[in-house]
Image: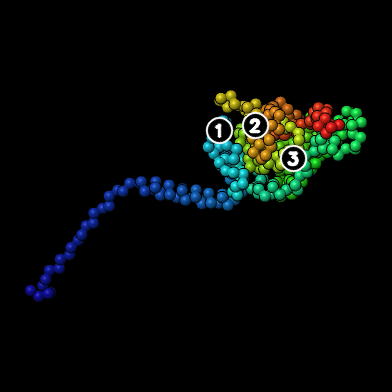
Amino acid sequence: MTDAARPIIIKKVKKGAHGHHGGAWKVAYADFVTAMMAFFLLLWLLNAVTDEQLEGISNYFAPISTTATTSGAGGLLGGETVRSDRDYPDPMGPSSGADTVQPARQGDYDETEVEGDAETPPEHDDARAVIEHAPTDLAELAPEDLDDMVREREEQQFEQAKQRILEAIEAAPRLKPLADSLLIDNTPEGLRIQIVDQEGLAMFPRGSADMYLHTRKLIELIAKVIVEMPQPVAITGHTDATPYATDSGYGNWELSVDRANAARRALLQYGVPPDRVSRVVGRAATDPLLPEAPEAPGNRRLSVLMLRNAVTPLNTAAAASAGL
């Protein structure tokens, strides 16, 4: 058979139709696109807000403990030493409820700035020092005159303590934003040093007695002055008038006491002898700094009072020991 006579065979192959695969892949793809969109949105937000605002958002969603931790890393230092070189952007909470915390302006605080803020303090001055440096005819002075001398010397001590604290804050650049948080005044009871909340700069987290690092830095600065003074110390905690209570009944009274006691522990940690603390009191909102605005941040504060000494007994004992 020749090639021309061969039959031409055409083979047709029918391809089977594709089966239905379902729509599950569409759901997975939509989830992927949504996740990518959220990821890029997160990157944009991280670049658009400050570290303090991010800490505030984080703190808003964090649970708040209203009970004092007695062990582990939940204490005053949070498991770290005060000498730690770690960067401390303090977490600040939302602006609602009692003892509200606003996003803060503070950053980290160097230990060296507090330690090197002032010159070596002068020696203690008490009634004995007054007597030793007084004229030789001191024995002829009336008790009232001797009391006046000691009172005058104590006023000088208070004024020097105030100036040392203010100069220390001025000498530490990172403590300067806290200058408005420190109020120092001379009262009939003694020299009163108050650490108060500012709008946007709180001393404690909302509803907590665990103080921020910048609060501890202020207390450390105050302690450096107190240890060089002879007067006993009284500590008082205050809150604002915003109602605050947990299911267990823990409220502003308990909170003010716990914060005052936290300040006492911090003072002892920084060298103040335990027997120098004469009382620790919580006043809640009963003694507002701003009576016309009972819910203002300035009413939330710690008060450290250097009490005036009992003049006459002190002078009598000092005079007797001096042989006068």
User: Of callouts 1 and 2, which one flags the residue occurring earlier in the amino acid sequence?
Assistant: 1
- Gap in angstroms between the C-alphas marked 3 and 2: 22 Å
For disc 3, the marked residue is 228
Q: Is residue 160 left or right of residue 29?
A: right
Say which of marks 3 and 2 sits in front: 3
Q: Residues within 10 Å of mark 2 (few under 14, many from 20)?
A: many
**Callouts 1 and 3 close, C-beta under 8 Å:** no
Q: Which mark is residue 70?
A: 1
Query: Looking at this rendering, what residue extends furthest in the left direction?
Result: 1
Residue at 18 percent across and 63 percent down: it is 11
Q: Quadrant of the C terminus?
A: top right
Q: Position of residue 319 (x, y in %)?
A: 84, 31
| Pick the front one: 107 or 218 | 218
Check disc 3 and give the amino acid type. Answer: Glu
In the image shown, does 43 or 229 lie closer to the viewer? Answer: 229
In the displayed structure, 35 sits above or below 269; it is: below
Q: Are marks 3 and 2 in contact (CB under 8 Å)?
A: no
Query: Which residue has dot 2 on it?
Result: 261
Q: Secondary structure at mark 1?
A: loop
> Residue at position x 67%, y 39% from top?
271
* Residue 162, x across and y down, in percent: 78, 40
SS for dot 2: helix
- Of 31 and 278, nearer the camera is 278
Mark 3 lies on a secondary structure that is loop
Residue drawn at 73 percent across, 29 percent down: 288
Q: Position of residue 214 (x, y in %)?
A: 66, 42
- Which amino acid, mark 1? Thr
